[in-house]
Image (cartoon, rainbow, N blue to C red):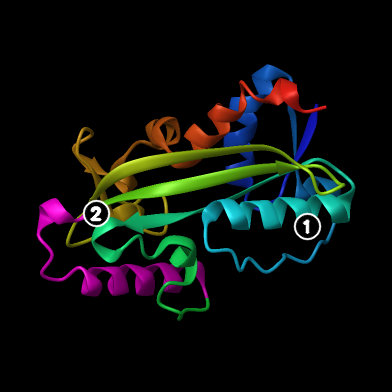
Amino acid sequence: MDLVVATGNPHKIEEIRAILGPYGVCIVGLDDLGATVPEPDEPGDSFEENAAIKARAYAAALGRTVLADDSGLEVDALGGRPGVHSARYAGVGSTREERDAANNAKLLRELAGVAPAQRTARFVCAICVAAPDGRVLVRSRGSFDGVIIDSPRGSHGFGYDPLLFVPDAGCTSAELDPAEKNRRSHRGQAVRALIGMLPSIG
């Protein structure tokens, strides 16, 4: 079967292709199609809602079965924030690097004075596969748990990776070897969860 992945991020496409390819799933990126589809607004209150909005919009526009994901960071001490607002939490910055730095700074300000034991958090990824007629065919979810530390560490990854310390690995997400990070990641978990469900796609 063919699945269009609603992203222009080549690293995300390769990660999904590496997991699903051996099961006979052909992963196609938006750039591979040469298609220009306006990215839909994602006003949902959950990762699942936003993934479904994106999957349905791209599937309808392309006339193809589409996989879309929505992901972000949930911090328990902040009631689950930044959550679906993770990418633009601070609301400033014109580049990814500027947004990441501003988001991380805001997160640390909000956690100032919070004890380390109360800084539990997780990356979450929700995936939705939708048909051109709007049907949701498959949903999955993955999470990657850790604790928010006081200052960034590591050069791998992006976003909040330098702040999420993974206790059993003894390092932050940004200090993990990329292959090990992919093995553990919230997105990798969500994609692998699809494997047992893919035969149900007609």
Q: Name the residue under label 1.
A: 57
Residues 153 and 64: in front is: 64
Q: Quadrant of residue 198?
A: top right
Distance of label 2 from label 1 (alpha carbons): 37 Å
Q: Closest to the observer: 85 or 15?
A: 85
Mark 2–mark 1 CB contact (< 8 Å): no
Quarter holding the N terminus is: top right
Identity, as a three-letter code, of the amino acid under mark 1: Ala
Residue beneath disc 2: 153
In magenta, the rendered stretch is 95-119
Q: Which residue lies furthest to the right in this view?
A: 63
- Is 96 magenta? The answer is yes
- Residue 140, image x and y in percent? 56, 37
User: Which residue is outermost to the bottom?
Assistant: 92
Residue at 86 percent across and 46 percent down: it is: 132
User: Disc 2 residue type?
Assistant: Arg
Relative to 114, is 90 above or below? below
Q: Which quadrant of the rendered structure holds the C terminus?
A: top right
Q: What element carries label 1?
A: helix
